[in-house]
Image (tube, rainbow, N blue to C red):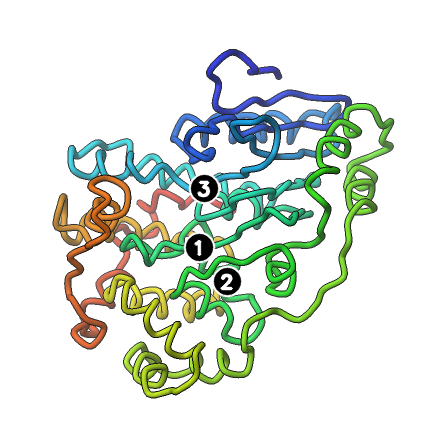
Amino acid sequence: MNASVPETHVIAEVQGRVGCITLNRPKALNALSLDMIRRITQALVAWRDDDQVQAVAVRGVNKEGPFGSFCAGGDIRFFHQAALSGDASLEDFFTEEYALNHLIHTYPKPYIAFMDGIVMGGGMGISQGASLRIVTERSKLAMPETHIGLFPDVGGGYFLSRCPGRLGEYLALTGQTLGARDAMAAGLADGFIESGRLVGLWNSLAQTPFENGASVERWCASHLSTTVSPGSWPAKEIDRVFGLPDMHAIISTLESGDGEWAKATAATLRHRSPLMLHVVLEQVRRARAMGLTDNLRMERGMVYRCFHLRPGAASETVEGIRALAVDKDHQPRWNPERIEDVGRGHVAAFFESPWTADAHPLKHLG
């Protein structure tokens, strides 16, 4: 399968015995469109049943060429426009994106993610399910959705809740960016390679006579440093504070603390959507006891609520995207305005599924 025609945002081609996917939308930091999600899915489904393809490798490009940026997430300007115009393809986007996330997590062949540069939101969704997650000195991993009135979706509840201690709550609520070594310490990456060696490793996939998929993965892993050093975060403080029962306790404890970390963390949280902070805390804690499929179904209902509980411009997510990426005034008008103003009813609504089990758009996931 070779889709490498001009202006194709996903190049999917078999090189040797490896299915190679290149995200090729550098001006948008490879942000995912619905068409890109469909092209990736189409390639993975075709290669899953193709005996000639032993493994899959995925990377991004930047304006200078291969690598340098993996994927900055979903196309949030599209979310904004589609929500305001009532475009039904917004629903298709999330249904098909989450189905793709599930496909990657459950893929029967090695799926190797070259997570060089920015890996955020939807970029985490197409890399966290990989059997080998490779980072470099340029890697920047984050789930920054509370900044736009959204929540860490694409399975974020599942993979963040599996981070050590209460780190998942901390990362989900603050949107903190992790470099390569911290990503490995958090359990969100498997091995490190210098970015200058990526092109050589990628090209070797086409030229090496691999015996099977496992040997492709072993070959890539043999080029990585897998030494995990302690994370740069204050683990004991994070566990103490982010293990508290609710957002009210978390923010008041941070604001009554006298350390630099507590003050900076409180200031960060005060800039996030108060409503979504409460929702996200509940999401991560529910997800900790869930399998991947149930988590994705929960998140699909949650994202529907993000755009439909208060439709159009009244949506917290639409307002968050407006402030960050459309008007760029960085002055979101959050509703409610303060963490202290969010009630339990506000939060509970996000976890009431809009569909019966039989009508759920992800009912077919295995």
Name the quadrant containing residue 55. Answer: top right
In the rendered structure, which amino acid carries the disc numbered 2?
Leu
Specify the amino acid type for callout 1.
Met
> Which circle marks residue 171 in the picture?
none
Which labelled disc corresponds to residue 72?
3
Query: Which residue lies under the disc numbered 2?
Result: 160
Q: How many marks?
A: 3
Sequence-wise, the earlier of marks 3 and 2 is: 3
| Pointer 1 residue | 143
Q: Which residue is nearer to you in this view: 231 or 278?
A: 231
CA separation, marks 3 and 1? 10 Å
SS at mark 2 in the image: helix
> As displayed, is residue 234 above or below residue 100?
below
Q: Position of residue 324 (x, y in %)?
A: 27, 47
Query: Image quadrant for the N terminus?
Result: top right
Outermost residue toward the top in this view? 5
Query: Is residue 350 shown left or right of residue 75?
Result: left
Q: Secondary structure at mark 1?
A: loop
> Residue at position x 17%, y 53% from top?
309
* Alpha carbons under labels 2 and 1: distance apart: 9 Å
Q: Earlier in the sequence, mark 2 or mark 1?
A: 1
